[in-house]
């Protein structure tokens, strides 16, 4: 079990809906509103940050499941707020529930699961897969 990560621990953050975070820019839709992929990324980053402060340098966490319910649109310039809570810890697996809202209403409800992995072992697996990819298409795996 990741030492120090406990059920009930939370993280909060906020971000502005910028052009780069809109569905029209990302390509997940045609409208300049907060994109579902931007919401998913925001939750993943927050949950990764919460876990990372508990891990030694040789460990990291990777996202393994994500269930996103995008409830309402947020326009360009709005501020999206996030509160993610650890709702389960079993072995190396940590489950989160995140709620997101803007200045007017709830906009998202996300369930996310992350797994703790050994960084070097993970990178060796990535390198083994890149061996068969032509050099022009592959990039070397990088530490986070």
Image (cartoon, rainbow, N blue to C red):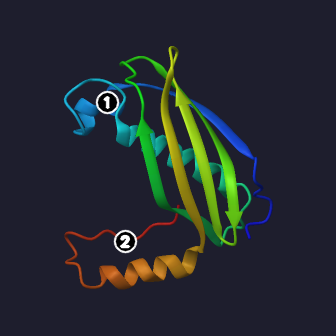
Query: Could you classify mark 1 by the number of other residues whose Cα lies within 10 Å: few (under 14), some (14-19), or many (20 or more)?
Result: many
In this picture, residue 139 sits left or right of residue 86? left
Query: Could you classify mark 2 by the number of other residues whose Cα lies within 10 Å: few (under 14), some (14-19), or many (20 or more)?
Result: few
Instruction: Determine whether label 2 and label 1 are within 8 Å by CB.
Output: no
- Picture mark count: 2
Is residue 101 depicted above or below 135 in this figure?
above
Give me the residue at 66% from left, 71% from top: 92
Is residue 82 depicted above or below 51 in this figure?
above
| Residue 48 x/y as whole percent | 59, 53
Q: Given this view, does label 2 or label 1 mark the residue nearer the observer?
A: 1
Q: Quadrant of the N terminus?
A: bottom right
Check the image and name the residue furthest to the top: 104
Query: Dot 2: what SS?
Result: loop
Give me the residue at 68% from left, 50% from top: 86
In this picture, residue 62 sits left or right of residue 22? right
Q: Which mark is residue 140?
A: 2
| Residue 3 x/y as whole percent | 79, 65
The picture quadrant where one finds residue 134 is bottom left
Mark pair 2, 1: CA separation: 29 Å
Give me the residue at 28% from left, 33% from top: 23
The picture quadrant where one finds residue 94 is bottom right
Q: Which residue is mark 1?
A: 22
| Residue 60 x/y as whole percent | 60, 66
| Residue 127 x/y as whole percent | 39, 80
Give me the residue at 67% from left, 45% from top: 85
Q: Which mark is residue 41?
A: none
Which one is earlier in the sequence, the residue at label 2 or at label 1? 1
Is residue 92 depicted above or below 35 in this figure?
below
Query: Dot 1: what SS?
Result: loop
């Amino acid at each position: 079990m990741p030492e120090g990560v406990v059920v009930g621990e939370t993280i909060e953050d906020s971000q502005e809906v910028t052009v780069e975070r809109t569905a029209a820019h990302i390509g997940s839709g045609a409208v300049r509103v907060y994109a579902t992929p931007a919401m998913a990324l925001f939750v993943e980053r927050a949950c990764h940050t919460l876990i990372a402060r508990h891990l030694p340098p040789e460990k990291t966490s990777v996202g393994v499941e994500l269930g996103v319910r995008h409830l309402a649109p947020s326009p360009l310039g709005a501020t999206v707020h996030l509160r993610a809570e650890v709702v389960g810890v079993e072995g190396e697996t940590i489950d989160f529930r995140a709620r997101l809202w803007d200045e007017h209403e709830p906009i998202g409800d996300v369930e996310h699961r992350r797994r703790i992995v050994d960084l070097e072992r993970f990178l060796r697996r990535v390198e083994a897969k890149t061996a068969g990819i032509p050099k022009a298409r592959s990039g070397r795996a990088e530490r986070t």
